[in-house]
Image: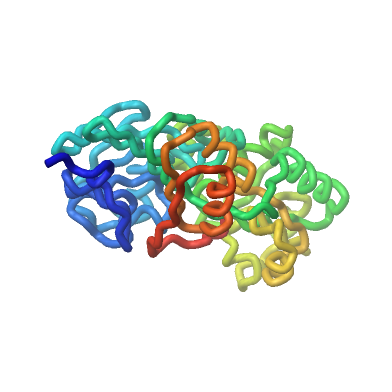
Amino acid sequence: MTAAPFSWIRPERHGIHILPADAWVDPARPVPRALVTHGHADHARGGHGQTIATPATLAIMALRYQTRAGAVAAEYGEAVSIGAGVTATFLPAGHVLGSAQILLEHAGERVIITGDYKRAPDPTCAPFEVTPCDIFITEATFGLPVFAHPPIQGEIAKLLNYLDNEPESCVLVGAYALGKAQRVIAELRASGHHDTIWLHGAMEAMCRLYEEHGVALGDLRLVSDAPSKEALRGHIVIAPPSALHDRWSRRLPDPVTAMASGWMRVRARARQRGVELPLVISDHADWNELTATIAEVNPQETWITHGREEALLRWCQLNQRRARALALVGYEDEDD
């Protein structure tokens, strides 16, 4: 008896289950075998028996979650057999360093799981690769038409202009520790800003890991190593979003609070976080990128997960594209 199409892959509450190989993609709990798209905590977790991911993602997981045992590295473009006639190929997703879409092939059928992704250029990671498939499993973090991310160069210019106009202050930028912080730094360098950038201590290890993987970030120093409070005037300081208003920030001279996040498009969120200088910088695809990517990949069916599934599902229906929304748990709206 012939198996039903795509019966070998099943979305379950805690992740995408590859039934013949008994493997999971980005599972929300420890499993014997996990394929991991990237290193953010809502996709990568410790405790798996075996973890298959790109070398950079494995390095990030070792740093963040002390996961070294059972690691299997998969280079971009390398087809890895995971058993029972299933192969997995990791393809660039453009989200953060090491991030990957995972192309699964079995019985002549092709499924891509994007994890998180973006289409905008990013000097800190390999760009997203459009790859044909039968089923395309996409995120929808910014899956509403209101989300249209501006070019990052304009947001960086906004930051530098403020710094030029307020030389007696420092600009304290809240940025997610993995991916966002390094992208902001790299874009500042690309815009000609080569002054020292000061870091909260929680940012240092990940920035050094990026440098070890060939991403040049320039002169970075810890705020705790500054010779005086005055030495920070006229400089950019980067810290986790949680540090923007805590006791640590009191050591800074007249800081202007900025935040780099796609959520800064929502003014209420900026006000709620006490952000004076919102920077709309996202490491996720916006609405136009999500819909354009589905059109480019042109799958037989689109599965939509973690985010604003309903609007993207409706767009697919209006454009005569088969689609369904998945009900997975454990994926969060991180400070993007």
Q: Where is residue 322 in the image (x, y as percent from the top left)?
A: 46, 45
At x 31%, y 49%, the residue is 25
In the picture, residue 218 is in which quadrant?
top right
Q: Where is residue 116 in the image (x, y as percent from the top left)?
A: 47, 47
Q: In this view, does 304 lie above or below 52?
A: below
Q: Is residue 134 left or right of residue 128?
A: left
Numbered label tally: 0
In the picture, residue 113 is in which quadrant?
top left
Q: Position of residue 211 (x, y in %)?
A: 49, 36
| Quadrant housing the C terminus | bottom right
At x 69%, y 58%, the residue is 264
At x 42%, y 45%, the residue is 137
Which is nearer the eye, 250 or 13? 13
Q: In this view, does 144 lie above or below 212?
A: below
In the picture, residue 265 is in which quadrant?
bottom right
Please say whether residue 311 is visible from this viewpoint. yes
Which is nearer the eye, 80 or 300? 300
| Quadrant housing the N terminus | top left
Q: Is residue 48 left or right of residue 289?
A: left
Which is nearer the eye, 157 or 63? 157
Q: Position of residue 267 (x, y in %)?
A: 74, 64
At x 44%, y 33%, the residue is 92
Please say whether residue 181 is visible from this viewpoint. no
Residue at the far left in the pictured view: 1
Q: Is residue 269 left or right of residue 86?
A: right
How are the residues colored? rainbow
Q: In this view, does 120 lie to the left or right of 178?
A: right
Which is nearer the eye, 77 or 214? 77
